[in-house]
Image: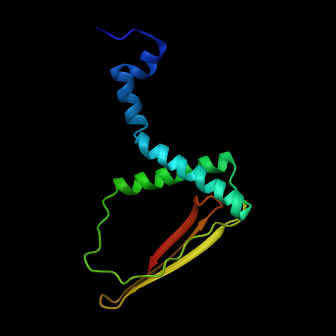
């Protein structure tokens, strides 16, 4: 038996519409749900304990930015280091105040390879990338 031809069927449920939506919006629904739940929880904690919470628009920008970043990383072919890295202390990025930017720098030295590099980036209060650079030294 065929499905009734409704507006929802034409726009969402028929095979072709479903395939097109999945190609255009390939996000895993459970990932969206848990990401949204995390951000709601985190924003509420910030409002209660730090007296600062993001607006709905800024939360949406942050979620979209993080999904774009995550999926671009998962699609790229990143080579993993084969040697054990030294444990580092955990440093957490803290966003600047709204309508301000944060400028972060970092460097790397590999003595055995006689290689070094440095980089910097600028991010806004929701963590979105504004500008940056990296260079071998």
Point out residue 78 in the picture as x, y percentages from the top left corner: 32, 63
Point out residue 6 in the picture as x, y percentages from the top left corner: 45, 11
Residue at the farthest left position: 82
- Total marks drawn? 0
Point out residue 93 in the picture as x, y percentages from the top left corner: 57, 70
Where is residue 49, by image quadrant? bottom right
Where is residue 42, by image quadrant? bottom right
Where is residue 23, by image quadrant? top left
Q: Residue at x 59, y 53 (%)?
A: 41
Q: Is residue 111 left or right of residue 125?
A: left
Relative height, residue 100 to residue 60 (above, below) = below
Compare residues 43 and 137 and report the one nearer the observer: 43
Compare residues 118 and 46 and report the one nearer the observer: 46
Relative height, residue 112 to residue 101 (above, below) = below
Look at the image and tell me whether residue 27 can be seen. no
Q: Residue at x 38, y 33 (%)?
A: 22
Compare residues 124 and 52 and report the one nearer the observer: 52
Q: Quadrant of the N terminus?
A: top left
Relative height, residue 29 to residue 96 (above, below) = above
Relative height, residue 87 to residue 19 (above, below) = below
Q: Is residue 114 left or right of residue 66?
A: left
Q: Residue at x 45, y 20 (%)?
A: 11
Look at the image and tell me whether residue 127 can be seen. yes
Point out residue 8 in the picture as x, y percentages from the top left corner: 47, 17
Q: Quadrant of the C terminus?
A: bottom left
């Amino acid at each position: 038996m065929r499905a009734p031809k409704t507006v929802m069927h034409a726009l969402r449920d028929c095979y072709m519409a479903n395939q097109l939506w999945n190609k255009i919006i390939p996000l895993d629904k459970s990932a969206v749900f848990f990401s949204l739940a995390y951000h709601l929880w985190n924003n509420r904690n910030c409002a209660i304990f730090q007296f600062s919470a993001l607006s709905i628009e800024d939360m949406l920008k942050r979620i979209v930015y993080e999904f774009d970043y995550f999926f671009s990383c998962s699609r790229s072919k990143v080579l993993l280091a084969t040697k054990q890295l030294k444990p580092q202390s955990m440093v957490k990025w803290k966003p600047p105040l709204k309508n301000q930017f944060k400028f972060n720098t970092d460097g790397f030295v590999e003595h055995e390879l006689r290689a070094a590099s440095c980089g910097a980036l600028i991010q806004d209060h929701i963590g979105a990338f504004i500008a940056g650079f990296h260079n071998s030294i």
